[in-house]
Image: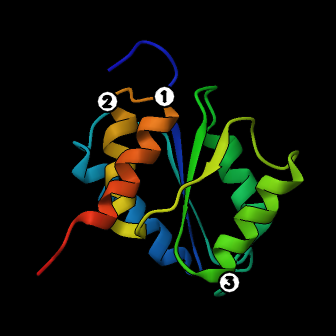
Amino acid sequence: MTDGPLVGIVLVSHSGAVAEAVAALAVALAGGGSTAPVAAAGGTADGGLGTSAELISTAAARVDGGAGVAVLADLGSAVLTVKALVAEGDELPDGTRLVDAPFVEGAVAAVVSASAGADLAAVEAAAAEAYACRKV
């Protein structure tokens, strides 16, 4: 682990429960101890299903330590909401990147690599490599 700031991870899902569960799984599989900062941004502000730009922005600000923020999203409009926030340029911390990766497997890879001190590009690559993990 490095002495510097770690890449933060934000997990965006249409469901708050799903985002929280994937965050807990990723942290547990990363050792469960001291890990990179991880935040779930799932559902809407009132607890419903959907995607909230405000929840995503708040989560990204919470995990930003200056090393960049990797955002993984589950479904279409979650991806579109993150893309819109990145395009706006002032709603997310500098260095925030939408990572193209499978949600669960990518989250685990991102949290493990970020917790080991990987930079944002390496975290993104580790998460994206999860697409190559065949199950059959």
Query: How many numbered callouts?
Result: 3
Q: Which residue lies furthest to the front in this view?
A: 132
What residue is shown with label 3? 50
x and y, in percent, of residue 43 in the image: 64, 78
x and y, in percent, of residue 30 in the image: 26, 45
x and y, in percent, of residue 125 in the image: 41, 46
What residue is shown with label 2? 116
Q: Residue at x 49, y 15 (%)?
A: 4
Three-letter code, disc 3: Gly
Q: Is mark 1 on a helix, strand or loop?
A: loop
Which image quadrant: the C terminus? bottom left
Up-down: is 70 above or below 135? above
Q: Distance between the residues labelled 2 and 3?
A: 32 Å
- Mark 2: give few (<14), some (14-19) or many (20+) Cα within 10 Å: some
Q: Classify residue 90 by image quadrant.
A: top right
Q: Is mark 2 on a helix, strand or loop?
A: loop
Q: Are marks 2 and 3 in contact (CB under 8 Å)?
A: no
What residue is shown with label 1? 6
Q: Is residue 100 left or right of residue 83?
A: left
Q: Do the residues labelled 1 and 2 touch (CB within 8 Å)?
A: no
Up-down: is 16 above or below 62? below
Q: Earlier in the sequence, mark 1 or mark 2?
A: 1
Image coloring type: rainbow
Q: In this view, does 16 lie to the left or right of 88?
A: left
- Mark 3: give few (<14), some (14-19) or many (20+) Cα within 10 Å: some
Q: Residue at x 40, y 69 (%)?
A: 102
